[in-house]
Amino acid sequence: MTPGVLVILVLVLGGIGFVLGRRRALQSAAREGLKLHSLPGYYGQTVALFTVVPALFLMATWLFLQPIAIENSVSSQIPDSAVAEGSARSLVMVDVRRIAEGLDSLAEQGALSEQVLLDMRADLTNVRSRLAEVGVALGSEVSPAVFEAAKSYRGIEHTASSIRTVAVLIAALVFGAWAWMRIKPRMRARNVSETFVKALLMGSSLVAILTTVGIIGSLLFESIQFFKLYPATEFYFSTVWNPQFRGGSDFGFLPLLWGTLYVSFIALLVAVPVGLMIAIYLAEYAGSHLRSFAKPAIEVLAGIPTIVYGLFALITVGPFLRDWIAQPLGLGTSSSSVMTAGLVMGIMLIPFISSLSDDIINAVPQAMRDGSYGLGATQSETIKQVILPAALPGIVGAFLLAASRAIGETMIVVMGAGAAARLNLNPFEAMTTVTVKIVSQLTGDTEFASPETLVAFALGLTLFVFTLGLNVLALYIVRKYREQYE
Amino acid sequence: MSEAATQDAVNASVEQPVIKMRGTGVNVFYGDKQALFDVDLDVRQHSVTALIGPSGCGKSTFLRCLNRMNDTIDICKVTGEITLDSENIYAPMIDVVELRARVGMVFQKPNPFPKSIYENIVYGPRIHGQVSTRAEMDEIVEKSLIKAGLFNEVKDRLQEPGTGLSGGQQQRLCIARAIAVSPEVILMDEPCSALDPIATAKVEELIDELRVNYTIVIVTHSMQQAARVSQRTAMFHLGKLIEEGPTDKMFTKPDHKLTQDYITGRFG
Amino acid sequence: MTDMTADKPAASTGPARSLLKVGERTRKRNAAEKRFRMLGLAAVVFGIVALLGLMTSILSNGLSSFNQTYIALDVYLDPAKLDKNGNRAPEDLRKITTFTVQPLILSAMQTMLEERELAAEGVNAKQAAALISKEAPAELRRYVIANPDQIGETVSFDLLASGRIDGYFKGRVTMESAALDRNISPEQLMLADQLKQAGLLELRFNWAFFTAPDASDTRPEAAGLGVAILGSAYMMLIVLVLSLPIGVAASIYLEEFAPKNRWTDLIEVNIANLAAVPSIVFGILGLALFINFVGLPQSAPVVGALVLTLMTLPTIIIATRAALKAVPPSIRDAALGVGASKMQAIFHHVLPLAAPGILTGAIIGLAQALGETAPLLLIGMVAFVREYPGAPPEGFFDPASALPVQVYNWTQRGDPAFIERASGAIIVLLVFLLIMNAVAILLRRRFERRW
């Protein structure tokens, strides 16, 4: 039974539990002639919660742990001899998994019966071509040991799934029944179910923490793998980025860092003055009519997906810059360039900066403006000498958040900046960024355990640390600023 | 101008009152709502004019008309005529910036800029181009602070933020800030309502001293304060000017019953 | 004016400096004021121009994808070729290949040209048949399998014209560009003109764009958004089902129950940070955690949805907390005052009052998720998928595409006709987003309360 169906089944059981619990509460109250402590619905709710929550929790944990357990037990079955020279056990395991998947789809399509599959042997059948029929392409012929491992992988997985289904259903029934048995008129069902709900609420708030832990965990784990294969100093200080399919790659981080910073710099150069001036104009000069229209419009604009801007860079801005500026001036012939990506990213950031700055400028109390106007200052003098200095921390915060967004932006640079890792000053040259390389290293067909793939995690980790620093600083500044005027 | 000459001017004004500002038929509208009805009021030079009346009577509105602070409110419309030295300040070619340099304002809540004390004071003179060198600035800061009676308290921390002062000090800083531009008229909108009694006493004392050199219009809710600091008092009620006259007379035998009731605390 | 110092009060009786004469310095300051204001206006204009440029670029490139060129053709479904055994057995029919069908189209084209007496110099029958999309044989094959009884009849089809012909009628391909093009010749275009005059070729609204699956590199005219729209819909469904309850539950806990201590502070900072973490990092998380570790299938909507849920959660939590905060404490007090438990006060009174704000936040979060591309690239949703995913819940695990990823996918193809498709897909995406945002704004306007 697949997890989806199982979830639905558990939910149905929960529904039944609700009805039964409610009925039992009413009946027992009538029988004993006592008043129920809580409304009858709470008794039903208690039973339903006890039925559903532990079962689903069990299932989630199981789904999470099952692959690890199976992986370990199957991995130990593979003799060292089956691991080819220069390869790793984890690479062999990738093959095992893929063969198992292929066998699954063979069985599903009805091309082979279960029995035939079990009897199939790698040394007798051409497993590779059979699997190719169902779209599983293998790099080499399958060795008998690997094939047997795959078969046992499949077997264990099937058994585990069956046990999982049974275990989850039993959990649902046992906990549900236990809660149902406990129903007595004097039972404080409302308190029980409320405590339960509160625990659920608390659990939900942990998801955010778990996400962060997951991000840091996965980035760190894989990055460490990478740094075991490739020295960190070379990664961070080399100026050559040249990944090869067949090993011996150079992964110099500096050209990527340069491209990232250069693009972000141009983007901020466009976005900060324009965005800030728009915010000032809307906050200080525009009439309430224009404001009531412009404010939501800017928010909607800030929600335009970056792929839209990416396409804009690719089909319009890039060719325009190349044909009208770069080529006539002899600065380059590439339509994807730092300038293209920077300009378009700047346009993307304008509503973001405007929206943030507008909030910040509006947080400056009216009394400041009155004080300045009362002294005979003009509006622009008031803005430049009173409002902006007062709002400066907030604006710096907004600027840092924008910088963090620019550095982490992916689609615009993937479609507008190019893929060549270069250290160059000419903004009309194609350069590349950290995010572009993460995408290109992880969407290729390289093996997962190779440094060519793992480098993406090291890049991701660096990117994460960088943006995290900017975000924390920005949020701290903005928070302090808000407190000042509250 | 020598001390004696100043004194002459003061004497002259006592003998023959000079009308510094004059409102004639002033109506103010906030959108559809009329806030002031046909107000005629003179402000005499070198005297303190107090505007009193219950909340919402239009006294603050009138005050804000005198240096066109109401311009910052979109829906506010002013008709009628207000003159400064016989020139209509609502005439089309008038520049509010120049007007406000001559008619300064101190607000209800102290509102120092989030800058240093020094910067707070030189801000006005600098934008009006009255000072340019460091020496001039130092001088104006010292003079303004001395006049506002704050110099001794803050002279060692001029570079500290103005927001770090106590409420009363902040308000005197705001007065010093207004004086620094050397206005002719200073408008004060309940300048003591956010202050404790001791700070209030200091500010009132200051107002009395400033009268010698400036023309002051003050809005206040406190009858005692009006009696203590002002020479003339104007009573507003429901957007209308009820009566206006010397403070002594207003507080002893007002012409109008409403004034009598308000002063004795029967309403308001 | 500069000679005035603080020392000199206005002792004069007449105007010392007339207000009616604007001073030199004031004039300069007013000029500066005007300049500054113009600068602000210029910034606004720049923003609007950039936006118009963006929209014009997308619309001018993409609107044409909603129309498609079709060629009407009567095809004789030759039994000798399609069903050699003559028994119409489905399993035999399924073995028909597009190579079997191709000659039928060729001869149908030939017949039509002869009947209508249409010809262009230097265009042989094969080149004439090349006006028709390479997708046409596949369409014919499907038709034959579905309607075996029609074998032996002559059936009228409206077949897709090839991408170049389609481009010709949309202005993308010209006689000059055709002369340089290996795939099409000016003569073929002339023939297409004749077909159009004969009423056999027309531009029609392109329903298939919204329903058909993606097509390979050589047949942009057949590429559609069907799989992508379905994949996006699946993902949005899961995102909504997961992120709304979890987000609301987390917000209720943080806003109403959580003690104010370091731990909840940490959660708060953490949520604010998550909202600003680059989306691609979530993609890496999805790849490492859900695909490599848990072993969920690549390209599956369920993985995309999980990643997007984690990304959407902070948005929903921030919006929900703001909505809860906006409900005044008096409401809680009133409920507690009549003896409701805290939980009851929140679920019966506070939550319903905060619901419009929460919904608005959820819609905006979903809109963000709908347009997110980068993380989906990493979890393999960029793969070429032609099969529709199955019905949920099983279909959640089938490979699918997503709208923004489909756009990216098309921009990576060689044929310029795919740029038109990509822009068209962007328009579809933007229309969805516009609808969602409009609903959110309407909700806010309609139910916004001021306390």
Image: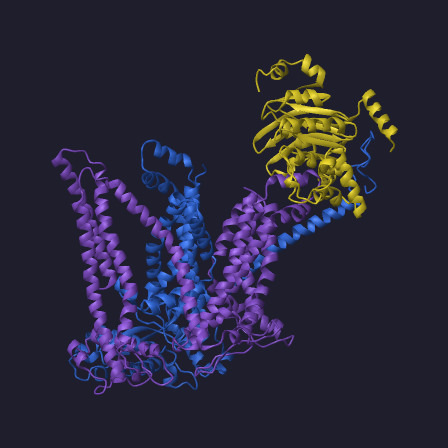
Question: What is the quadrant of the C terminus of chain B in the image?
Answer: top right
Residue B209 lies, in percent from the top left, at: 76, 27
**Nearer to me, A474 or C411:** A474
**Is C339 situated above or below C103?**
above
Q: Quadrant of residue A7?
A: bottom left
Q: Is residue C200 left or right of residue A305?
A: left
> Chain B takes which shade in the image?
yellow
The colour scheme of the drawn protein is by chain
Residue C236 lies, in percent from the top left, at: 35, 58
Residue B249 lies, in percent from the top left, at: 71, 14
Visible in this render: residue C320? yes
**Nearer to me, A1 or C43:** A1
Q: How many marks?
A: 0
Q: Is residue C51 left or right of residue C266?
A: right
> Chain C takes which shade in the image?
blue
At a point 11% along the width and 36% down the height, the residue shown is A31
At a point 68% along the width and 36% down the height, the residue shown is B174
Residue C227 lies, in percent from the top left, at: 34, 67
**Nearer to me, A103 or C126:** A103
**Is A37 situated above or below C152?**
above
Chain shown in purple: A
Q: Is residue B78 left or right of residue A37?
A: right
**Is A431 situated above or below B159?**
below
**Is B93 situated above or below B221?**
below
At a point 25% along the width and 82% down the height, the residue shown is A145
